[in-house]
Image (tube, rainbow, N blue to C red):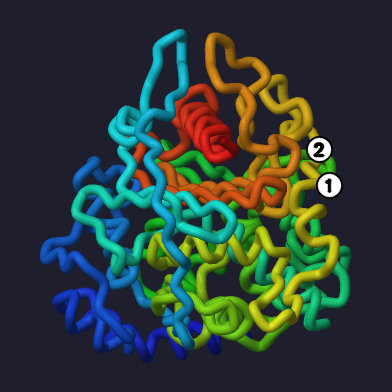
Amino acid sequence: MQIRTVSLLCALLLGSTAVARASTAGKACHKLGLSSCPTPADKTLPAAKDMLTWGQAQRVIGFRNDWRMYEGDVFKAGTPSPLPVALQDLSALHYEVDAKRYTLADYLSRNNVTGLMVIKNGRIVYRYYGSGNTPDTLWTSRSLGKSVVSTLIGTALKQGHIQSLDDRVSRYDPQFEHTVWGNITIRQLLQHVSGVAWNEDYTNPASDFSQLTACEAGKDPYACVTTLVNTPDRKPVAAPGNEWSYSSGGAWVLGDVLEKATGKTLAQNLQDNIWQPFGMTHDGVWHSYCKGQHDVGAHGFNATLEDWGKFGLFVMNEGVLPDGRRMLPNSWLKECSDWTRALHSVTPSHPNGTYGFEWWHNDVPATASHVAPRNGMTAARTLWAIGIFGQLIAIDPEQKLVIVQWSTWPEAEPSFAKQPLEASLMFNAIANGLQK
């Protein structure tokens, strides 16, 4: 009944959604109630249903217009507190792959980077906008948004909306009581060790993720995705906690649980607990399956480059606000980087584990050879938020360093030996250069 009620509410909004999709960027901006309109205002947008097969130019336009290609909930900025700027020349920094040396300029080109910002000790020391992007561009996170949801789980735990990470999800979201998800815990969803079958293959048109993408481009996405994720045909393939398997389906469940536990959409949670109290500079938009009712737990966070960086600072500062209030549990940052030891998370490339509380461990792979610098960022505790096609936030609390990146990598999920390796090497070089 709960699913049907939400679906009917969403269906009533479909007409306005169609208008928003067809409108110009300016009309979409004002319809959403954004305080300022994102730039550039691209006129022709690629088809949302083809997101996984867009070309490079389409990805640039699509990723910076995601906020108006779907229904969305706005998270409003309060009193902006822009970061101080103390720019440094990083052009001489370099890294090596297969004994070939590449500079920062090479890195930007080789990795299709459309935005890069480096924040050291709370100051912007480097910023780059490419492909026509600007400080007002709202770029989409893809799965980097999972790390934002993880952080909101932390705020809900701190505030008592969630009693324990070891609670079953059905305690907060009864629709899952008699499903394969019913006995899975919040902690297991955070670590992606639910054991529930889910095919995340971005290259397979029949995969669960491809079907999810199709649902998002169609009518009544909440009902469509709910049916996909919660189908009686979905079975366990491993005991909960035993095997790591990346799952946007599980992340969707986690987002839904958070909304039910708090009584707020993801956008409202973000606005109230982080965006306004931490002084973000611009409004953002969260991809919604039903405006004002349900936002997407697996992705869909759209914000400016500086605000991506400020979110990284919020996490790095362990959720401490400018007024001294702490929004995250005391041990949250440590728990996020206690990489799960479940099967498939521990690999020859990452023998200490690959994944934490919806954060990645993207240090230089142990198996990589003929690369430099191998060290720079604090490998054991640096948190990486990663979205397909190269959306990155790297947070090194020990060095007070945050690096954020927008990209349009040629592949959605390249191996650790490709673009993720170059990112870890370049970010190491930046960390080393800023220590001098």
The structure residue drawn at horizontal position 27% and vertical position 86%, both measured from the top left corner, is 15
Tag 1: residue type? Gly
Residue 423 sits above or below residue 192 on the image: above
The structure residue drawn at horizontal position 14% and vertical position 76%, both measured from the top left corner, is 24
Query: Marks 2 and 1, how far apart in space?
Result: 7 Å
User: Residue placed farthest to the front in the image?
Assistant: 436
Q: Residues within 10 Å of mark 1 (few under 14, many from 20)?
A: many
Tag 2: residue type? Ala
Element on which disc 1 rests:
loop
Residue 277 sits above or below residue 185 on the image: below
| Residue 210 shows up from this direction | no
Mark 2 touches mark 1? (CB < 8 Å):
yes
Element on which disc 2 rests:
loop
Pick the residue in front: 330 or 151. Answer: 330
Location of residue 306 (image quadrant): bottom left
In which quadrant is the N terminus drawn? Answer: bottom right
Q: Total marks drawn?
A: 2
Residue 173 sits above or below residue 343 on the image: below
Q: Which residue in the protein does label 2 denote?
A: 342
Query: Nearer the N terminus, badge 2 or badge 1?
Result: 1
Residue 296 sits above or below residue 266 on the image: above
Q: Which residue in the protein does label 1 denote?
A: 241
Tell me where residue 170 appears, x and y as whole percent. 79, 73
| Residue 266 shows up from this direction | yes
Asked if residue 219 lies left or right of residue 289, the reply is: left
